[in-house]
Image: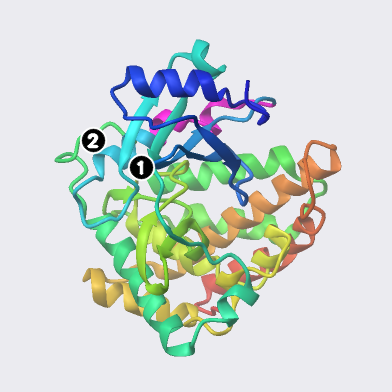
């Protein structure tokens, strides 16, 4: 039995062999840091390297930890212009290791999470990295989801209206006190829902630290990761969320100085314009999409604070999330008037 909780290396080795995956020697493992959702392990034999992901061993919320869904999305994106890790195996038999798990090839590269890591990158490469991130997101939005077999991934019709209703309802569940500003923002959003919108695959959580950049070259994305929130929706909501994450309050949400909030990166206005140019999409109703994004992040932050106060978080970095909520709601109200930080 492995020393890692939720990982049985002999059982995994047998499963790989039974799935016609070549294994040379015994398997070794290391816990990959950075994830606060599914458990992610680096797995090695004497010749190859893989990544194994499985749900947490406790506090399981199936809809939030659906590794099989993530696997099917990345499998469908093989061969498209969206870089993803080559998929190896999906096991949905919980008798093997206590839960479903996935195996993909290990991608050699670098993940830039913090400001200090980004500060070590030359300015010209940071600008090129931002261009590459925008290009990859636009490429995702251009994928014909029916052609790659993802037509049942979500319900694109009415997506934006459902998002507004979803996050307003979520606020009611996690709030610790009433807020006139939250009520103002929540009441304005339904009035501004666009009558029509495009549909595409949306990642839902796209920023620099949810990609693996090429080893030794931050200007190239080797793989996009963390697909748990991906669905069929409105592409403008996806780029807006990418822009919302540039707000300094993300540091409080994540509990560390995030790379994506660094002033070394392009401004929100610049990022949005780059996306519009690359994708050919007009940023119609942009104020609405940005305001919705800020509202969503504020509710997420409030949810983190709610779990922290209830003693339901594990590890550090959760105590500052609640203090970001007023800043994010204020930014959302400003966005309604076309003012972006």
Q: Name the residue under label 1.
A: 158
Q: Residue at x 35, y 21 (%)?
A: 17
From this view, report whether residue 65 is shown above or below residue 191. above
Horizontal side of 297 relative to 106 (left or right) equals: right
**Label 2 or label 1, whichever comes before in sequence order:** 2
Task: Answer few, some or many: residues within 10 Å of disc 2's Cα (few below 14, many 20 plus, some between 14 and 19).
Answer: some
How far apart are the two marked residues, 2 and 1, measured between alpha carbons?
15 Å
Quadrant assignment, res 240: bottom left
Label 2 SS: loop
The label shown at residue 217 is: none
Nearer to us: label 2 or label 1: 2
Q: Name the residue under label 2.
A: 151
Q: For the N terminus, give its image quadrant.
A: top right
Quadrant assignment, res 115: bottom right
Horizontal side of 87 relative to 340 (left or right) equals: left
Q: Which of 300 and 230 is in front in this view?
A: 230
Q: Residue 101, how many percent across, how many down?
A: 47, 27
Q: Nearer the viewer, residue 181 or 88?
A: 88
The answer to if 195 sits in the magenta stretch is no
Q: Residue furthest top?
A: 95
From this view, report whether residue 27 is shown above or below residue 179. above
Q: Residue 261, how many percent across, how many down?
A: 59, 73
Q: Nearer the viewer, residue 340 or 308?
A: 308
Label 1 SS: loop
Q: How many marks?
A: 2
Q: Which residue is drawn at 51% across and 10% down?
A: 95
- Magenta residues, start to end: 59-70
Q: Residue at x 22, y 57 (%)?
A: 81
User: Tags 2 and 1 in contact by the CB under 8 Å rule?
Assistant: no
């Amino acid at each position: 039995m492995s020393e890692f909780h939720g990982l049985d290396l002999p059982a995994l080795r047998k499963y790989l062999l039974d799935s016609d995956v070549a294994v040379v020697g015994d398997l070794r493992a290391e816990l990959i840091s950075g994830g606060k959702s599914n458990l992610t392990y680096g797995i090695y034999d004497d010749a190859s390297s893989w990544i194994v992901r499985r749900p947490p061993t406790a506090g399981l919320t199936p809809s939030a930890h659906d590794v099989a869904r993530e696997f099917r999305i990345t499998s469908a994106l093989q061969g498209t212009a969206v870089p993803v890790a080559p998929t190896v195996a999906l096991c949905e038999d919980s008798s093997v290791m206590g839960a479903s798990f996935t195996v993909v090839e290990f991608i050699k590269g670098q993940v830039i999470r913090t400001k200090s890591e980004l500060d070590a990158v030359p300015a010209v490469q940071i600008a090129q990295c931002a261009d590459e991130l925008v290009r990859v997101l636009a490429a995702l939005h251009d994928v014909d989801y029916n052609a790659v077999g993802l037509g049942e991934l979500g319900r694109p019709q009415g997506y934006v209206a459902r998002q507004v209703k979803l996050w307003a309802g979520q606020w009611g569940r996690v709030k610790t006190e009433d807020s006139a500003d939250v009520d103002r923002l929540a009441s304005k959003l339904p009035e501004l829902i666009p009558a029509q919108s495009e549909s595409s695959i949306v990642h839902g959580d796209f920023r620099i630290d949810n990609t693996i950049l090429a080893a030794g070259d931050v200007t190239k994305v080797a793989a996009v990761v963390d697909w748990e929130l991906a669905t069929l929706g409105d592409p403008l909501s996806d780029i807006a969320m990418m822009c919302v994450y540039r707000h300094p309050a993300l540091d409080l949400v994540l509990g560390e100085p995030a790379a994506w909030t660094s002033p070394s990166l392009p401004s929100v206005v610049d990022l949005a314009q780059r996306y519009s140019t690359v994708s050919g999409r007009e940023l119609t109703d942009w104020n609405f999409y940005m305001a919705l994004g800020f509202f969503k992040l504020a509710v997420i932050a409030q949810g983190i604070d709610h779990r922290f106060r209830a003693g339901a978080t594990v590890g550090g970095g959760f105590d500052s999330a609640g203090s970001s909520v007023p800043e994010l709601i204020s930014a959302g109200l400003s966005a309604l008037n076309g003012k972006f930080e």
